[in-house]
Image (tube, rainbow, N blue to C red):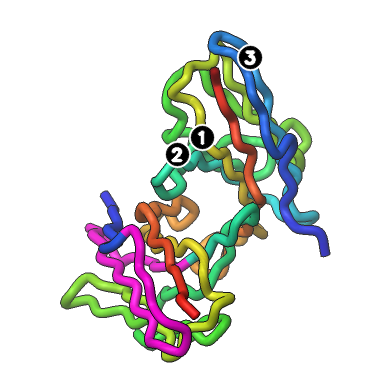
Amino acid sequence: AQSVTQLGSHVSVSEGALVLLRCNYSSSVPPYLFWYVQYPNQGLQLLLKYTTGATLVKGINGFEAEFKKSETSFHLTKPSAHMSDAAEYFCAVSAVDSSYKLIFGSGTRLLVRP
Amino acid sequence: GAGVSQTPSNKVTEKGKYVELRCDPISGHTALYWYRQSLGQGPEFLIYFQGTGAADDSGLPNDRFFAVRPEGSVSTLKIQRTERGDSAVYLCASSLGAGGFTDTQYFGPGTRLTVL
């Protein structure tokens, strides 16, 4: 079975500061890992995903995440926060043998202070 | 092009009533998914369609929930005898259906269901 834990339901950063959103997962089989962003009144949008190969994954809007198998982590980072990054971020995992079924964490709301 | 659309955007009903939630996937996407997002939680998988058939309905919470996709495009999620605990945002997603890691799910804006 797979599960996802996102540490911190709310993270607040200043504009221009580093963004770090934490995600840890558990999976009994090789996982696929995802980060989605949800803006108010909009659907979830895929930021990036890890499937195989290079463990550092670059996504849209300057975000990236690194898959660390030894730490079972897939933390999301961005060097410099913009006001437009304020949203809710969800980490998700799926299994190679049931890749259609996304298991989501409970989400982290990112607040960006001017 | 058009994304996934869901109607209605908001639905308020009374306990015990029947509701239908509609999802229009992206044209050409053969796979369709329903998720439920309760307040303060991440989306929770309900059901997955490949074409017209439900390939995995293991996430449906009980037999009051049912979903159909008769022509392999539009899908309807049906909830009978609604309960206050059914209040949530119901999300629909679609994908090309090729399977594997290339098959990205695209989400609609959701239907917010409130059961009074």
Residue A15 is situated, as x and y percent measured from the top left of the image, at 47, 84
Tag 3 subunit: B
Label 2 element class: loop
Q: CA distance from mark 1 to mark 3?
A: 15 Å
Which disc, if any, is residue B38?
2
The label nearer to you, 2 versus 3, is: 2
> Of callouts 2 and 1, which one flags the residue occurring earlier in the amino acid sequence?
2
Which disc, if any, is residue B18?
3
Q: CA distance from mark 2 to mark 1?
A: 5 Å
Residue B74 is situated, as x and y percent measured from the top left of the image, at 75, 39
Work out whether residue A103 can be spotted. yes
Q: CA distance from mark 2 to mark 3?
A: 19 Å
* Residue denoted by label 1: B88
Residue A14 is situated, as x and y percent measured from the top left of the image, at 42, 81
Q: For this rendering, which residue is in front, A45 or B24?
A: A45
Tag 1 subunit: B
Please report the residue visible at 61 percent of the width from the left and 11 percent of the height from the top.
Answer: B17
Q: For this rendering, which residue is in front, B78 or A84?
A: A84
| Residue A30 is a magenta residue | yes
Q: What crowding class fits label 3: few (fewer than 14 Cα within 10 Å), some (14-19), or many (20 or more)? A: some
Marks 1 and 2: in contact by CB < 8 Å? yes
User: Which region shows up in magenta?
Assistant: A9-35
